[in-house]
Image (spheres, rainbow, N blue to C red):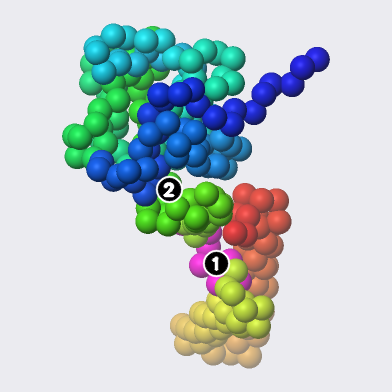
């Protein structure tokens, strides 16, 4: 059983634009002349739904050509056929100024450099075009702040890809995580311990204040006798136990969510 070849170059004449290249850059040309960014070859580190398939692209002469497209990290790559061996062209989504559906029959386009270059595409259906646009926009937004637009060496190393994904995942983690757990994820272990401890010490102190105030109120409202005072204290103790159990259950719930990955530490 033969293995699928890893694409390493594009056919001569295929236009390619790197993320640090402007519309007048001398780094535009064939893939052999410029070199394909590692991020366009995979693996796809974005954690976004994979998307690939045949699309029609409009050539410079206006002819619609069927090509095999695939989104990888913040690149839209296309091949001449479904064998996906030789890359024909790589488009950097970070450079796109507009990615949108342009027609109800599956047309959509990517505009680069403020209208200086337009990639017109056609999907089989409008729904398919909308999925492509949604996916490509998400990729652009994930990497736009991290792609090294003026550093060719960093672009080639590709280490920014993991950092961009990590930042997005961490932002989602912070948004969905109780503040006490976020504090526990601080940089220094001792600081983590102190912040996490103070958060729940505050809950216990608040609970104790509420219970004591309740007992005093009960005694003031007619439970002045010894029996009444003892009953109020007993009820206060029950409340204290119930609230303590509730707080401990919340702590356990938060820690379990971290442990099972639903609030995975970044």
In this orientation, which residue lies closer to the viewer: 197 or 139? 139
- Image location (x, y in percent) of residue 110: 29, 30
Q: Quadrant of the N terminus?
A: top right
Which residue is the extreme one toward the right?
1
Tag 1: Cα neighbours inside 10 Å, few (<14), some, or many (≥20)? some
Residue 204, placed above or below residue 84: below
Residue that mark 2 sits on = 143
Residue at 62% across, 59% down? 265
- Res 182 seen here: yes
Query: In the image, residue 45 lies at what x, y percent?
Result: 57, 42
- Residue that carries the numbered disc 1 in the rendered image: 182
- Please provide the residue range marked out in magenta: 175-184
Instruction: Name the front one of labels 1 and 2.
Output: 2
The disc at residue 83 is none
In percent of the image, x 30 and y 38: which residue is there?
96
Q: The C terminus is located in which quarter?
A: bottom right
Task: Label 2, secondary structure: give it.
Answer: helix
Q: CA distance from mark 1 to mark 2?
A: 24 Å
Q: Quadrant of residue 243?
A: bottom right
Q: Residues within 10 Å of mark 2 (few under 14, many from 20)?
A: many
Residue 10, horizontal then vertical, whole percent: 50, 26
Relative placement, left or right, of 158 versus 93 is right
Check residue 261 for magenta coloring.
no
Say which element carries label 1.
Answer: helix
The kind of secondary structure the magenta stretch mainly shows is: helix
């Amino acid at each position: 059983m033969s293995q699928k070849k890893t694409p390493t170059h594009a056919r001569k004449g295929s236009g390619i634009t790197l993320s640090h290249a402007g519309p007048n850059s001398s780094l535009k040309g064939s893939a052999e002349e410029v070199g394909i960014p590692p991020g366009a070859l995979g693996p796809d580190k974005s954690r976004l739904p994979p998307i690939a398939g045949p699309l029609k692209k409009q050539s410079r002469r206006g002819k619609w050509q069927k090509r095999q497209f695939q989104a990888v990290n913040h690149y839209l790559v296309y091949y001449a056929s479904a064998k996906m061996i030789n890359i024909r062209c790589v488009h950097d989504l970070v450079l796109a100024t507009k990615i949108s559906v342009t027609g109800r029959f599956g047309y959509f386009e990517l505009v680069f450099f403020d209208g200086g270059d337009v990639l017109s595409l056609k999907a089989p259906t409008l729904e398919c075009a909308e999925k492509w646009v949604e996916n490509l926009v998400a990729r652009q937004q994930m990497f736009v702040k991290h792609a090294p637009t003026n550093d060719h060496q960093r672009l080639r190393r590709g280490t920014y890809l993991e950092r961009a994904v990590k930042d997005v995942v961490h932002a989602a983690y912070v948004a969905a995580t109780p503040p006490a757990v976020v504090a526990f994820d601080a940089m220094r272990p001792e600081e983590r311990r102190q912040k996490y401890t103070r958060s729940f010490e505050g809950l216990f102190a608040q609970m104790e204040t509420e219970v004591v105030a309740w007992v005093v109120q009960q005694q003031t409202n007619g439970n002045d006798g010894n029996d009444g005072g003892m009953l109020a204290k007993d009820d206060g103790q029950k409340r204290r136990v119930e609230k303590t159990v509730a707080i401990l259950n919340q702590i356990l719930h938060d820690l379990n969510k971290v442990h099972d990955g639903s609030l995975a530490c970044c």
